[in-house]
Image: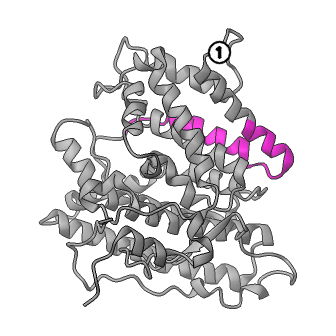
Amino acid sequence: MLPPPTVKSVNIALAPPEYHRDISRVRFAYNYLNEIPRFLQPQGLEYNAVPGLKKSVKSGQRLHSMTSNAFTLDPVAAGLPWPTGLDCIRQSKFWQSGLSISSKLLELFARDETVSQAFKANEKSLGSIAAHELNTVEEDRFTKFATYLFPEADEDRMRLLAASIVYIVIFDDAWEMVEGNELKDVRDGFLDRLQGRACQAPESDLQALITSTVDGFREQDALAGDGGQEVIDRLVDFCKHVPPAQKFDTLGDYLTYRRIDAGVPYILACVKFSIASNVKIESPQLEKFLRLISDHVSLVNDLASYEKEKRAYDQGRTYHLINAVEVVQRLFSMPTENSAKALAYAMQLEIEVEIDQELTRMREERSLTAEEWQFVDAVLTMTAGNVFYSVVSSRYGGESTRIPE
């Protein structure tokens, strides 16, 4: 009988020995699908082996996004839950730089007097949200998200991406405004700074660092690619997106809304920026592939976060339950939450098969350029990284999923 896993054994098995000193240690393992039927299992995807891809474009062109900025992880070898057929998981070597700037930003948000007076409808101030994140061990915070989703970014780009995730955390659900409080002023001031419309009055330390990160995205665009401005633009869109409908009449309507609510356009812009690409995300050649990716990201996030979100909703700590599991259970009159989870997970697995088919079609038709294939590869890494983060983060499963030392 094998001994139970420990933090040490998991992290030793997670990556080759030459990368052990670079690993951001995994301390949690959340099997958020442990009660669904066992017959629902991920399928092996043909694209994982990239068969025949080199014939898709002219020889001599790099068709993958992998760089020396990251290394590959093996969650299955480490004994972690792995509820997907995607198998390219990478970790940034620059995760500490990303966490450093994100911690500094969180501290400034938590201390800022104006931010602390901006309250959402759930009576949480933006400052208290930052303070709550600071109560989590740095290596386990949500800001670690970039480590697995955008691993090929160089150190400067990783710092900027990690900073942008802080803004997502702080301004998430900023539409939940209370009449007469400071939230609208704080949000609008932040948007003005993103869009280069900030007033010339003396800046606070927080405002100065926000301005510095925004300038950093544009400076990186001057060096290579044009994704920095897109990250800024999609951040603006995310902060301005509208409240959800009370009920969604179809799952398609829900997933269309969830694409915006989950920040998928922002995430795709971050992927593009991370590899210094000039690719056109709106290209018709990529449209179906990216729609499938969007649905996959949304379903994974909803499956992983459902228990936490349902608990918060039942306890009155949030005013909306925006989750595919709830939508599936209501629309299809599923008898239990677990049966709704099973159906949502079956949809995720079906989407993975469709992604595989779309990749095969694009490969056989040779319809993409080398730069587009690099972006596609980075998007697949992001998608697998999103699953990995959902499994190893304490954000969803909490202390009960901590791996013994």
User: Is-magenta flag for residue 274?
Assistant: no
Vertical order, 260 against 212 (above or below): below
Which residue is depicted at the point 73% across and 68% down?
67
Q: Position of residue 220 (x, y in %)?
A: 79, 45
In the foreground, 257 or 213: 213
Vertical order, 80 against 317 (above or below): below
State which region is magenta.
216-243
User: Is-magenta flag for residue 237?
Assistant: yes
Res 162 visible: yes
In the foreground, 72 or 214: 72
Numbered disc 1: secondary structure: loop
Which residue is identified by label 1? Answer: 203
Q: Residue furthest top?
A: 201
* Main secondary structure along the magenta-highlighted residues: helix
Q: Specify the amino acid type for callout 1.
A: Glu
**Side of 256 where 268 appears, left or right:** right
Res 295 visible: no
Quarter occupied by residue 299? bottom left
Quadrant (top left, top right, bottom left, bottom right) of the C terminus: bottom left
Which residue is depicted at the point 66% across and 69% down?
376
